[in-house]
Amino acid sequence: MLQEYNKILVAVDGSQAAEKAFKKAVAVAERNRASLVLAHVIDTRAYQSFSTFDGSIADNAREEAQNTLEQYKAEAEKDGVSNVKIVLEYGSPKIMVAKQIPESNDVDLIMLGATGLNAVERIFVGSVSEYVIRHADCDVLVVRTDIKNNLIK
């Protein structure tokens, strides 16, 4: 019996690695006739450095993320995935992608791009993909290659 996934979460952040993960997630969702959850988490830590927080900055980030998610949704639907949900949250990307979004959406597979952080940044910041691998309660697939399995550079 083959493993089938019913609800796949793909985390997108605008990076090339996330784009590759999205394309592979669409292919896996279509092949499994699964639902696809497209998620983006606006990292609230990015705004903590502003002494006078301007709400328009957060509004612009949310609007841009929403537009990007809508474009991804349209592309997934065009490629044959009939059930696509958009999730846009504020918070820690690590925690939201590893725990909160999967639990609230009954996700059984998380797909995300490999991190582009260097070793020093991982020590201080930590890798989202590394955290998700360690803490998620479902299967996690870290995408390192494009749809034709060519290494992402």
Image (cartoon, rainbow, N blue to C red):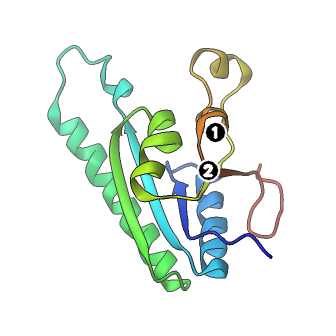
The dot on residue 89 is none
**Observer-nearest residue: 40 or 138?**
138
| Residue behind mark 1 | 129
Judge left or right: residue 10 versus residue 62. Answer: right
Callout 2: few (<14), some (14-19), or many (20+) C-alpha neighbours within 10 Å?
Answer: some
- Residue kind at label 1, given as amino acid type: Ser
In front of the other: label 2 or label 1?
A: 2
* Quarter-of-image position of residue 137: top right
Q: Residue at x 62, y 30 (%)?
A: 127
- Left or right, 23 with respect to 118, comes to left
Q: Quadrant of residue 1?
A: bottom right
* Above or below 139: residue 3: below
What type is the residue that disc 2 sits on? Answer: Cys
Observer-nearest of 30 and 42: 30
Helix, strand or loop under label 1: helix
Residue labelled with disc 2: 138
Badges 2 and 1: C-beta atoms under 8 Å apart?
A: no
Is 21 displayed left or right of 119 in the figure? left
Residue 52 point in image, percent of width and height: 17, 18
Q: Is residue 134 left or right of residue 12?
A: right
Horizontal and vertical percent position of residue 47 = 31, 25
Furthest residue to the front?
A: 1
Q: Say which element carries label 2.
A: loop
Instruction: Write the residue at 33% across / 62% down.
Output: 67
Give the x, y percent position of residue 128. Answer: 58, 35
Instruction: Name the residue rendered at 78%, 57% in the picture.
Output: 145
User: Which residue is drawn at the image coordinates 59% and 15% (left, top)?
Assistant: 124
Specify which label sits upstream in the sequence, 2 or 1: 1
Quarter where residue 8 is shown? bottom right
CA distance separating discs 2 and 1: 14 Å
Q: Position of residue 54 (x, y in %)?
A: 17, 29
Figure disc tally: 2
